Image (cartoon, rainbow, N blue to C red):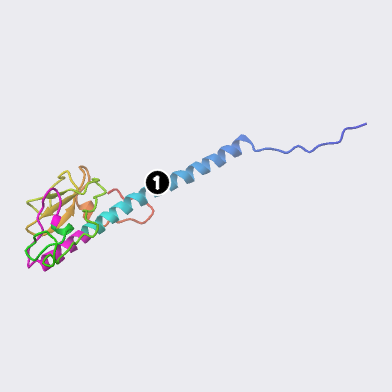
Amino acid sequence: SSRPRTRQCAGFTLVEVLVVVLIVAIVSAVVIVQLQYNSRHAELTTLRYNEATLNQLISVYKNDHFGLVPEVKDDTLPQLLAATDAAGNIGDGPQFRFGPYVIDGEMPVNFRTRSSRVAEIAVYPPAGYQGGGWLYHRPSGRIVADHKPGNAFKALVEVPRSDGLTPSKD
């Protein structure tokens, strides 16, 4: 008597498995690069937004206080963080009717330096890295994000030009 023939199932060859692994690796590499770019772009966008917001708040403070601008004390701008009177004094009560301008009571973090420290600078725009979060030029009432060494200062201020496919080198 003859044995019934069984059909053998052919598995994947080593070449087919390697091709699939290679395709998955290429797609993963593209996705990881894009995620890293999107994360850096989101941080830079947030930094620019915070910088613009702080400049607007200083402008509102200046208008409310007859041309006075906030002063740096203890590495921050306390007059933006608390209620003030018309002379810029911090306190409680009906005469302290201005502010707080920064609602959560803390300066925003500069994501590039991981600091919310405010340093007063003598010249605007700043020439280089100061080692902090924000650089404040009191005579002009302007505040800018500090930057780490090696990053061009203008890279924090200018919008990067990109085709959306290639990460910019900022």
Q: Is residue 27 left or right of residue 59?
A: right
User: If the image is split into quadrants, where does the N terminus sit?
Assistant: top right
Q: Amino acid at mark 1?
A: Val
Look at the numbered disc 1 and give the secondary structure of its residue: helix
Residue 160 visible to an observer of this rendering: no
Horizontal and vertical percent position of residue 86: 8, 66
User: Percent from the top left, x then y, of residue 149?
Assistant: 20, 42
State the residue lying farthest toward the right: 1
Say whether residue 30 is left or right of residue 40.
Answer: right
In the image, residue 143 sits, relative to residue 17, either above or below, namely: below
Q: Position of residue 119 (x, y in %)?
A: 13, 49
Q: In the rendered structure, does residue 135 fall within the stretch colored magenta?
A: no
Name the residue that disc number 1 marks.
33
Label 1: few (<14), some or many (≥20) within 10 Å? few
| Residue 79 x %, y % | 13, 58
Observer-nearest of 60 and 14:
60
Residue 143, by quadrant, is: bottom left
Q: What stretch of residues is rendered in magenta?
A: 52-78
